[in-house]
Image (cartoon, rainbow, N blue to C red):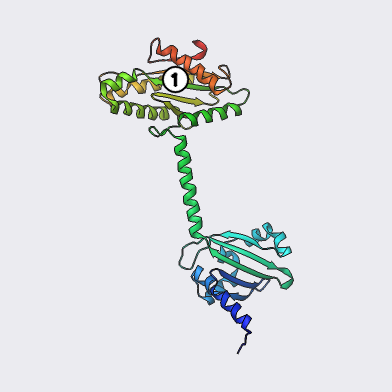
């Protein structure tokens, strides 16, 4: 029968009841398990005998870590006996998964002996992931126009500024500014509900016409903007805008209106209209102003105004 000193009895009791898993093993060709405490078994759901058998099969299966990668990444700490941490997500006995944070200390001169303490950090990791997702939602909301879900003015301006700084020397970009003609009259005649529906449909039409490779935003009120990089042929831009104008007019039948809703569009090209957001916005706005004060229901390029 083994006899222990008082200090040894106290130490063994502490090790059994400490709220983290504790493992001591001798590594090598034949792994020898010296100690596994109750908490280690409880965290992973195994009996002590099952746990020891799993450990003898290797750390890779038990803790879901690539042992070679761990040794490669922490080679200096292993050689010097400095503790290091490993985060893993192993499968428990019942088939679930837990995030495990392990603190590992390898003493080479002792065999080598591997001392591992670990804790279940699943709740913490899930809270952090939830917080990350919430922050991502808040970040997206800060960039979105709350009504149309397009980029808001600030986010679109930031995107355009960054794109203008990154553009190549031979690249030609386009900034398109548009608004709904006689929007105040639409609200007065049909009510704000119909006006809101037209704004929502305008957002949908812009997405349909210009697609994923464009930057589309609502500048405020009934004014929208589109930024297109490396446009290639200007005729394609003109064709897309004509399609946009046609789709806007088609809302008369879709929404059962007595008059056709129309839009006016101004287009500025980069670099000829300038190299900053203020430059290209001002140029597109002048082109838009030209259309609004002439025909409406049409488009104008800044270089022809």
Residue 232 shows in this picture: no
Q: Position of residue 64 (x, y in %)?
A: 56, 62
Q: Position of residue 37 (x, y in %)?
A: 56, 74
Nearest the camera: 157 or 59? 157
Instruction: Tell me if I can see residue 51 in this picture.
Output: yes
Q: Residue furthest bottom?
A: 1
Callout 1: SS: helix
Q: Residue at x 50, y 26 (%)?
A: 227
How many numbered discs? 1
The relative height of residue 152 versus residue 233 in the rendered view (above or below) is below
Using the rendered view, name the quadrant where residue 57 is placed. bottom right
Disc 1 packing (10 Å; few <14; some 14–19; many ≥20): few
Percent position of residue 73, x then y: 67, 57
Vertical placement of 4 versus 283: above or below?
Answer: below
Q: Quadrant of the N terminus?
A: bottom right
| 290 and 127: which is toward the camera | 127
The part of the image, by quadrant, that contains residue 105 is bottom right
Q: Residue at x 43, y 25 (%)?
A: 224
Q: Where does label 1 land, which residue?
A: 239
Q: Is residue 150 left or right of residue 90?
A: left
- Where residue 54 appears, as percent x and y from the top left, is 56, 71
Residue 6, quarter of the rendered image: bottom right
């Amino acid at each position: 029968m083994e006899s222990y000193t008082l200090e040894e009895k106290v130490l063994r009791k502490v090790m059994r009841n400490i709220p983290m898993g504790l493992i001591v093993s001798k590594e090598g060709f034949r792994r020898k398990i010296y100690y596994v405490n109750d908490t280690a078994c409880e965290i992973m759901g195994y009996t002590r005998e099952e746990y020891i058998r799993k450990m003898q099969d290797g750390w890779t299966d038990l803790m879901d870590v690539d042992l070679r990668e761990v040794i490669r990444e922490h080679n200096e700490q292993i050689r010097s006996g400095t503790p290091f941490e490993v985060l893993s997500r192993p499968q428990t006995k019942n088939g679930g998964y837990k995030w495990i944070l392990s603190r590992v200390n390898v003493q080479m001169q002792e065999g080598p002996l591997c001392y591992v303490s670990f804790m279940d950090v699943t709740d913490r990791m899930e809270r952090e992931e939830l917080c990350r997702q919430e922050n991502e939602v808040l970040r997206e909301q800060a960039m979105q126009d709350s009504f149309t879900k397009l980029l808001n003015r600030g986010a679109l301006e930031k995107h355009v500024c960054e794109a203008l700084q990154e553009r190549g020397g031979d690249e030609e970009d386009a900034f398109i500014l548009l608004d709904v003609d006689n929007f105040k009259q639409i609200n007065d005649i049909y009510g704000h509900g119909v006006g809101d529906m037209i704004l929502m449909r305008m957002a949908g039409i812009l997405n349909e016409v210009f697609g994923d490779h464009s930057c589309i935003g609502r500048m405020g009120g009934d004014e929208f903007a589109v930024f297109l990089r490396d446009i290639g042929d200007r005729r394609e831009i003109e064709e897309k805008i004509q399609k946009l104008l046609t789709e806007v007019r088609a809302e008369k039948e879709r929404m059962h209106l007595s008059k056709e809703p129309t839009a006016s569009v101004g287009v500025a090209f980069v670099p000829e209209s300038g190299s900053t957001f203020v430059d290209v916005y001002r140029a597109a706005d002048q082109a838009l102003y030209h259309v609004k004060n002439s025909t409406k229901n049409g488009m104008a390029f800044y270089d022809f105004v």
